[in-house]
Image: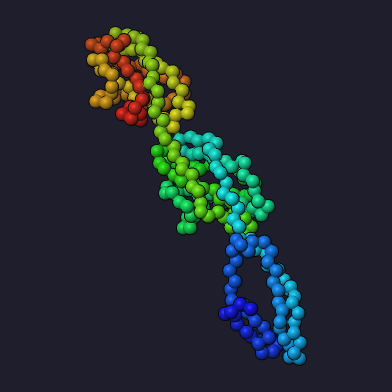
């Protein structure tokens, strides 16, 4: 009989014993039989050992899914766990996102709760060049989840676009047509183009002031630009969105 309990009366004085709280842990997982014996009634008869009931304990948390990146763009990333082997008592998943690494979800609020048959999730509203940490935890019917937590690092880095080769065609005494082909697919954070022209040749735009700035539009860009008569069209046109000083 565990110490610290309380005797009280149901029909007679001290005929019922209330045990103190009993803590269950992983070592008690499964079915735990409760046995009672030795009780003596008013006539002196002693109770033989009986098994009045059993307690089923679920104290083992399901394994944490291993996440794999499926796809991403400039503001979201989709992760999946298609190979996750679900336990029989799986209730669902909780999704967590933080800008700080974590090994426990204590104090964190789940950003989503998913059904047991879901195997992917899209983290949206993300900013480029920002460090995030994510975790998806499996939760069983008893509410157990993994501890400690393994958080995955998530970062969407801005892409440095490649150098553009522009075509320049003189269209008049004071004008030229500039065109180029460019496919921005796969470039995170791409916003458009900057155009520079100078009366002398140059190999960097670090100290230059852009002359034009325009956003990305589908199809080959074609712009007619007026140039002063002293400019030599075929030599001093340079169009490139590469490097931090160029990229919008």
Vertical placement of residue 37 versus 71, above or below: below
Q: Give me the residue at 68% from left, 86% from top.
A: 15
Q: Horizontal placement of 111 versus 31: left or right?
A: left
Residue 25 or residue 173, whichever sits in front: 25
Q: Quadrant of the C terminus?
A: top left
Q: Quadrant of the N terminus?
A: bottom right
Residue 242 or residue 180, whichever sits in front: 242
Residue situated furthest bottom in the rendering: 43
| Quarter of the image where one finds residue 164 | top left
Vertical placement of residue 152 versus 33, above or below: above
Can residue 216 be seen in this snapshot?
A: yes
Vertical placement of residue 114 versus 239, above or below: below
Q: Position of residue 4 (x, y in %)?
A: 57, 80
| Quarter of the image where one finds residue 243 | top left
Q: Give me the residue at 44% from left, 21% from top.
A: 182
Q: Position of residue 145 (x, y in %)?
A: 57, 55
Q: Give me the residue at 40% from left, 26% from top.
A: 161
Q: Horizontal placement of 154 versus 238: left or right?
A: right
């Amino acid at each position: 009989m565990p110490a610290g309990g309380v005797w009280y009366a149901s029909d007679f004085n001290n005929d019922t014993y209330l045990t103190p709280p009993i803590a269950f842990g992983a070592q008690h997982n499964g079915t735990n039989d409760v046995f009672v014996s030795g009780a003596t009634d008013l006539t002196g008869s002693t109770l033989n050992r009986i098994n009045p009931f059993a307690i089923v304990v679920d104290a083992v948390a399901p394994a944490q899914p291993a996440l794999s990146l499926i796809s991403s763009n400039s503001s979201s990333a989709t992760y999946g766990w298609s190979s996750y082997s679900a336990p029989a008592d799986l209730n669902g998943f909780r999704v967590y996102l933080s800008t700080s690494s974590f090994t426990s979800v204590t104090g964190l609020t789940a950003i989503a709760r998913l059904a047991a048959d879901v195997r992917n999730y899209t983290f949206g509203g993300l900013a480029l060049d920002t460090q995030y940490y994510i975790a998806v935890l499996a939760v069983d019917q008893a509410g157990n989840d993994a501890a400690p937590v393994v958080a995955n690092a998530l970062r969407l880095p801005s892409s440095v676009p490649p150098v553009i080769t522009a075509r320049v065609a003189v269209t008049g005494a004071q004008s030229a047509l500039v065109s180029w082909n460019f496919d921005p697919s796969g470039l995170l954070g791409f916003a458009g183009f900057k155009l520079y022209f100078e009366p002398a040749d140059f190999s960097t735009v670090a100290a230059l002031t852009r002359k034009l700035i325009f956003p990305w539009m589908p199809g080959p860009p074609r712009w007619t630009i007026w140039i002063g008569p002293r400019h030599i069209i075929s030599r001093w046109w340079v169009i490139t969105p590469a490097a931090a000083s160029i990229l919008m």
